[in-house]
Image: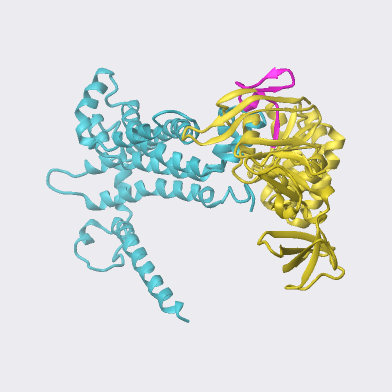
Chain colours: A yellow, B cyan
Amino acid sequence: MAAITLTGLSKTYPNGHVAVRPLDLRIEDGEFLVMVGPSGCGKSTLLRLIAGLETPTGGRIVVGDVDVTAHPPQRRDLAMVFQSYALYPHMSVRENLAYGLKVRRTDAATIARQIGSVAEALDIEELLDRRPAQLSGGQRQRVALGRAIVRKANAFLLDEPLSNLDPSLRAQARAELRRLHRLLGTTVVYVTHDQEEAMTLSGRIAVMRDGALEQVAPPLEIYATPANTFVARFIGAPPMNLLPAAVAGIDAPAGAVAGIRPHDVRVGTEGARRATVDLVEPRGPDCVLHLHLDGSNTPLLAVVSSAAPPAIGAVVFVTLPPDRLHVFDQRDGSRLGAHT
Amino acid sequence: MTARPAAIVLAVAGALLLAALLFPIYWMVVASLMPESRLFESRSLLPTAVTFEHYRALFDERDFLVPIRNSLIVSGLTTIVAVPVAALCAYSLARLRMRGKSLLLAFVLAVSMFPQISIVPPLYLILRELRLLNTYPGLVLPYLTFSMPLAIWLLTGFFRQLPRDLEEAAMLDGATRMRTLRDVVLPLAAPGVASTAILTFLYCWNEFLFALSFTLGPDRYTVPVAIMLFRGRYQVPWGEVLAATVLATIPVALLVLACQRRIVAGLTVGATKG
């Protein structure tokens, strides 16, 4: 187990594509850090840089006290779970789990013991003699996870490990991952494009865009005080509404944008602003309303209870509580603070 | 019902093609069993009389086991050397990051494009200086120069098709490149490796020009050279030639049948998400 420190780490591909801009990040020992961002933001490249599967253009990677920047993946002692699981198809589950230990010349008794305990923890004991092709998606995912944890590596790197699972299995696997992390206490770097996964799993979220870190903070902090409009709209579903300050009815410096989360928009029969309902999306416990404020074409999302949702085309009144407003700079999107 | 006529046409075309491919082999077997005197008389597709005289003559009078043994040794040695070396070369070309990779591949291909006859004289001189004329290495070495490019190209293609994730997983598990090649890449590319081995073996088994040029006597003749030299001054013993070709086909057919199972087995099924 070890902390991972990235200093000025960057990656530019030979074709000129900048995948990761120089960034600094310290992942504490035992932390569960989730890197999240839209596809192509560089989060997978960053993970592969840490793993040693890509060579950085600049910067350093330190695992524990060891500078591993120049080390090949074999010498970093990190374990990785791939999006495709990458189980060795010609080996049984048992051989898959044993491979990393065998390569490191672990003695047979220790291998058997460790496989036994991992198989028990992941409930895959009865699968040990099967081949990967004979497993379901959820079982393969558990075996891939088992192959990572059986080795007691410095840290676990997970690249969208749940994205190939059915939604019903995914929630279960998420809970399983958290339980395992509490049990093992190993440093985890987890890459996903799913903001909900990031929120529920992480100790800290690192939001990436265009190869740069936009904000690194615990999930609720990111949700409550997003550093800029990108983070504000990426974290939280449905995304935060962004309105010109004048439309939101606040006095803010010129060129400011007001943001408000759909859950904070109050919709009722009386209120400050008239709005028309364009679309109603029932989600079960609540409904998402697509509105536009009268007198402006600004679209506005609101979440209301599904008890008695308004009809499409209905006129409603909305209130934007001032204490729920976020204020951003219009030019670079950076946070100017909460409206007071 | 619209697919029906198309299916019939395809089946008929397939049957015709198969017949065209198999007929020479059938005729070779039939003719090898007919007495020499009947060979050019009958127009029958079925043998009019059966004799094993030609086969007996091959072993009693011509000692045909020697060329078979020579061919097996030369083809086997070439295959055993060519496939592992080509595998190493192909894996580097398929996966390692290096400059001029495509140039190197093009060069490898170019080497195999020389007309064989053009390099017979220089090779002859080299082999003579090395005192390798009329020896097994004297055939294996030239065969390697012609079979390796093919093997490298085939294997590079097979290796490139394998999911990269698996090799990366092995490297994170701590395996070196060589160990990854041995434990993960080769087992998964086994069908491709087997096909490459068969093609290399076949190439050497059928090779004629080098074998004729670099062997000096019956003790080192390979099968194609031996068969060609059956012809006497006044006549060609067609019955024995055909019996010899039947015998020369058998090891190859056995080899392909033995490897077929490996080739067909879809080993990579379920490797990644599915």
Q: Is residue A9 left or right of residue B73?
A: right
**Residue at image coords 34%, 38%:** B204
Taking depth in this image into account, of B59 and A221 the one nearest to the observer is: A221
Taking depth in this image into account, of A37 and A154 the one nearest to the observer is: A37
Q: Which residues are magenta?
A: A61-80
Q: Position of residue A312 (x, y in %)?
A: 74, 72
Residue B135 occupies quadrant: top left
Residue B228, relative to residue B132: is it above or below?
Answer: below
Q: Position of residue B50 (x, y in %)?
A: 32, 61
> Is-magenta flag for residue A74?
yes
> Is-magenta flag for residue B154?
no
**Residue at image coords 50%, 34%:** B95
Q: Position of residue B121 (x, y in %)?
A: 19, 28
Q: Position of residue B273 (x, y in %)?
A: 64, 50
Residue A82 occupies quadrant: top right
Q: Is residue B94 left or right of residue B248?
A: right
Q: Is residue B87 left or right of residue A288?
A: left
Tell me if I can see residue A141 in this picture: yes
**Residue at image coords 85%, 66%:** A270
Count up the numbered dots. 0
Q: Residue furthest left?
A: B234
Q: Is residue A118 left or right of residue B35?
A: right
Residue A85 occupies quadrant: top right
